[in-house]
Amino acid sequence: MDQYIAPVELEKASRLINHGPTILVSARHAGVQNVMAAAWACALDFLPPKLTVVLDKIAKTRELVEQSGTFVIQVPTVAQLNLTRQLGTHSLFKKPDKLMDSGVELFEIDGYDLPFVAGCSAWLACKLLPEPHNQQTYDLFIGEVVGAWADTRIFRDGHWQFENAAPSWRSLHYIAGGQFYATGEAMQANGDDAT
């Protein structure tokens, strides 16, 4: 594991995706692994931390999540723009060499039998909380976060540090047709902050 990757307290795990970034979803089952991009992911609860993600029925990653009961949500960076686009455009169903052709680098974290995408800024290991009706009707999956990590060059002390890092570390926000935006500048509102 990279020297800059550090655990994030589970009670602060929601902060890793609370700003609405495009995410990468990875999963593995029976020796098959895949990574896909997704734009619809959201923090759902604090303790235990939970999140939601929309996984279309046409996605091989969805099948792997359903079969394994586990998955990883990771936050790609501006430096991974083209990788993110490629992982979100090509299907493992149609392109068996998708991961090799994309150049994605996967790594392991001790204690988790999951594929993690190298170079991201944050990772959330999740166990699937099966909700068959939501999954079939709305393609909506709920995961309980069982482990969280972030790259300390961009997230530390429970907060993102976008304003102190190179622009290549900013997270991506997908619009449509290959168009993304990067996370913008930090601003502080006046008033008390309870968290």
Image (tube, rainbow, N blue to C red):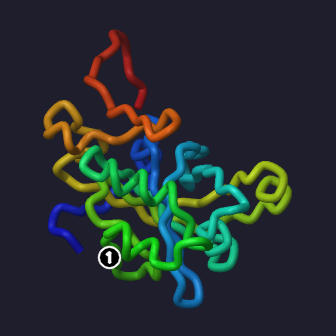
Q: Crowding near pointer 1: few (<14 within 10 Å), some, many (20+)? A: few
Q: Residue at x 30, y 52 (%)?
A: 80
Observer-nearest residue: 147 or 107? 107
* Number of dots carrying numbers: 1
User: Which x, y percent locates residue 3?
Assistant: 15, 68
- The answer to whether any part of residue 182 appears in the image is yes
| Residue 126 location, quadrant | bottom right
For residue 124, side relative to residue 39 (left or right)? left
Q: Residue at x 34, y 76 (%)?
A: 109
For residue 167, side relative to residue 160 (left or right)? left
Observer-nearest residue: 55 or 149? 55
Q: Farthest residue toward the top? A: 190
Relative to 30, does residue 24 appear above or below in the rendering? Answer: above
For residue 85, side relative to residue 159 (left or right)? right
Which amino acid, mark 1? Phe
User: Which x, y percent locates residue 62?
Assistant: 65, 66
Q: Which quadrant of the figure contains the N terminus?
A: bottom left
Q: Residue at x 65, y 51 (%)?
A: 54
- The answer to whether any part of residue 18 appears in the image is no
Relative to 112, does residue 127 appear above or below in the rendering? Answer: above
Q: Which quadrant of the figure contains the C terminus?
A: top left
User: Which x, y percent locates residue 65?
Assistant: 63, 71
Q: Farthest residue toward the bottom? A: 30
Q: Residue at x 35, y 81 (%)?
A: 110
**Secondary structure at numbered mark 1:** strand
Relative to 34, does residue 143 appear above or below in the rendering? Answer: above
User: Which x, y percent locates residue 33?
Assistant: 50, 78
For residue 54, side relative to residue 26 (left or right)? right
Residue for badge 1: 107
